[in-house]
Image (spheres, helix red, strand yellow):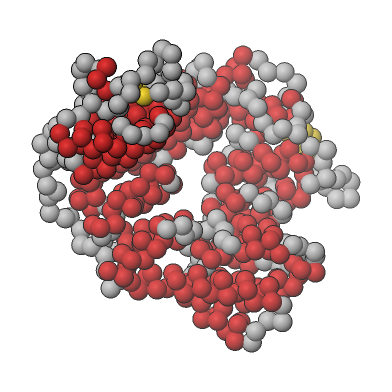
Amino acid sequence: MHTTNSSTAPNSLENPHSVENPHSVEEQWQILVSAALVGIERRSAALPLLTGTVGELIQAATENSPDVETQLLRASAILSLYRQAGHLPQKALQPPPAPSTRQDLPSCSVAAGQRLLFLLDGQPVELLEEWLALTASAGKRAPDAFLPALLEYARSHPRTVDASLAVLGERGRWLAAQNADWSFAAPATAEEIWQTGTRAQRGRLLTQLRSQDTDAARHLLSTTWSSEAAAERAFFLGRFVTGLGPDDEPFLETALDDRSQEVRRVAVDLLTRLPMSTLVARMHQRAQQLVHYEAGRWPLRAERLTIQLVDHVDESMQRDGVALRGIDQWGEKSTWTYHVLSAVPPWHWSNQWRRTPAELIKTVRNHEHGDLLFAAWVTATVRFQDMDWAVALLQHGATNPDLLAVLPTQEQARLILEKLKPDSSFVALNLAATIKEWSLPLSREVVRRLPVLYSAWKAAGEHDWEIRRQMRPLHFVLNPAVHIDVDGLLGKPPSDAELASLLSELLNTLQLRIAMRQEINE
């Protein structure tokens, strides 16, 4: 083969005899790949120096090549095929793990397993969450063959992690330990998770511990509190909402002095959920100076409500969170006042003024600062879980879904049906979507009213996409037994094609959920 000096012709391939020490096959391959990627105009490359048959083939294929590009391509083709044919499996650096122990849960049926695989392939996450919950409730686990797919899905969809852990079984946890990406599901002691786990893993541990032993959970957090970053302190402190009680107050009071505003905000929120906390007592004293009510004496005097805004914040108020950011459209003084009033149990006002929640809500409606007090009462009602106030606020225009969660299931259904009228149905459905399990009577009544509601939405000029968006949650919260009722509506096909399409989609989802239950119970 003709030899060309690379210093005078950098785009040529060097003669293999100019290289004294032959490289390994992989090193030779990387040289060729590098030359191909960068271009032989910028980097010269030597033909692979290999002995034996492969070396002879490269020499024979390239010695009469018309140009360096052809030489490079021919050598690469031969070496590429050689690498594939001669590749040996990599030797393990460590001994294989001990095999998984016997499964601790029975596997779900073959049909249920196939359904799981279907749900993992791009179906609505709500359906997968329902499958996981039903399977766990039945005391069963996911099939072994689908454990990798489930673990991978959970890794990329954190909201499904807790539900997935419940159906992995012993083998699933063993498998998770073999892949660092699945470490969130691998067996580990509480100490190991707390010291080396991810933020999500540590948060789950703390929440679980709070549900079992609040003292132990509080102690665990205290061991690393001073070394945690501000965002971590706020995140972990928020887990105290589980099992929150008076014993947490000293720790939370200390957190009021934290240098991070977000940590202080979380501490304030938790302390204002404790009716007997000293922070609530301090806020109560401040509120007494701000709001005054005088009952009316007809016909001599009308009732009178006076609301005075906080005009300055002292050091004590600053510590109690009065100066924290509030609702954006409010001014500074309104925000301060809101923080004070929202930390007072709402029953305080009805007891002190001897008026029902509904009467007081009507009184503030036309007041200059009525919206402020109404918003504060909504927040306080959620914090202190006051059912009487929750009912009154929802009946008088409140739309915060957290109010609905304060109420028992029967009362939730009654209020939803009360609001499920053409002029307020969107609000009702938004509230209802927060209820995890709908009763059969509520589900049937909602389905019965759907055609009338749809007509009202269209008459009001609502777009099809908005109607579809509002109906989507119904697919997952309606009792699936109402598929019969939906099928009945389609028995007399609606004249509106869009309504027929919406009902057909709803029917398909409900039937899928019915089938899912049957498969899991097999």
Compared to 22, does 405 lie above or below?
A: below
Residue 37: tell me if it is visible. yes
Give the residue displayed 76% in from the left and 41% down from the top: 371
Can residue 227 be seen here? The reply is no
The residue depicted at 38 percent of the width and 49 percent of the height is 153
The residue at 57%/54% (across/down) is 404
* Quarter of the image where the N terminus is located: top left
Residue 68: % across, % down? 40, 29
Specify whether 345 is left or right of 499.
left
Residue situated in front as seen by the camera: 205 or 188: 188
- Residue 155 vertical position relative to residue 468 in the rendered view, above or below: above
Q: Horizontal placement of 183 versus 372: left or right? A: left
101, 277: nearer the viewer: 101
The image shows residue 487 at horizontal and vertical percentages of: 55, 81
Q: Quadrant of the C terminus?
A: bottom left
26 is higher (above) or lower (below) than 497? above
Front position in the image: 204 or 334: 204
Relative placement, left or right, of 127 versus 144 is: right
Residue 140 lies in quadrant: bottom left
